[in-house]
Image: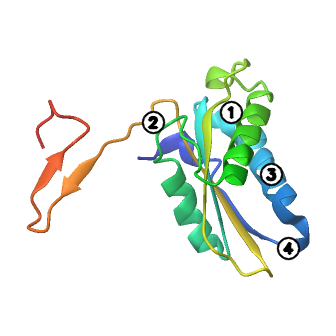
Amino acid sequence: MAGGGCTLPGRSKVLMPSEGYEGVVKFVFENISTLAVNACPPVLVGVGIATSVETAAVLSRKAILRPIGSRHPNPKAAELELRLEEGLNRLGIGPQGLTGNSSVMGVHIESAARHPSTIGVAVSTGCWAHRRGTLLVHADLTFENLSHTRSAL
């Protein structure tokens, strides 16, 4: 799921509540604008928001497992995903960092309930060669490969 340069922009931080979601946006932009060029762009960006950085980090990794182009079911989170995606693409990092309009393939946000005194935020990225698969594991531990039916495991 990850490795090499695409993990370079991964960061986490606890924000003061006064920073609000503007602080989350600023944190995402700082990380991607300064570090994504080394992560084989265009990248898929996962953002986790929770009380602690530990939970936010897990959520940011979960976010990059969502299908590219999917949107969060919460309309406000979906709007933030779209705004971040559009803004990050305007940075002009481009494919392989050689400039252009496609700096990110998508931005996905996952969140958890949080205490009002903190905003834990984490950013994870996946590179342009991002791969995803689905296994169905049964109670008896047998499984079915749902996404790659021609593959043998």
Q: Earlier in the sequence, mark 4 or mark 3?
A: 4
**Residue 47 x/y as whole percent:** 64, 54
Q: Taking 39 as reference, is 1 left or right?
A: left
Q: Quadrant of residue 55?
A: bottom right
Tag 3 residue: 25
- Residue at 80% x, 27% y is 90
In the rendered image, the vertical position of residue 129 relative to residue 81, given as above or below: above
**Amino acid at circle 1:** Val
Tag 2 residue: 130
Camera-side mark, 3 or 2: 3
Query: Considering depth in this image, is 121 or 32 the residue closer to the camera?
Result: 121
Q: Earlier in the sequence, mark 1 or mark 3?
A: 3
Q: Taking 30 as reference, is 106 left or right?
A: left
Camera-side mark, 1 or 2: 2
Give the secondary structure at mark 2: loop
**Residue 137 x/y as whole percent:** 19, 59
**Residue 18 x/y as whole percent:** 91, 71
The quadrant in which the C terminus is found is top left
Q: CA distance from mark 4 to mark 3?
A: 14 Å
Q: Earlier in the sequence, mark 3 or mark 2?
A: 3
Query: Considering depth in this image, is 101 or 112 the residue closer to the camera?
Result: 112
Q: Residues within 10 Å of mark 4 (few under 14, many from 20)?
A: some
- Residue at 22% x, 42% y is 146
Q: Residues within 10 Å of mark 1 (few under 14, many from 20)?
A: many
Tag 4 residue: 17
Tag 1 residue: 37
Q: CA distance from mark 1 to mark 3?
A: 19 Å
Q: CA distance from mark 4 to mark 2?
A: 33 Å
Q: CA distance from mark 1 to mark 2?
A: 16 Å
**Residue 101 x/y as whole percent:** 72, 20
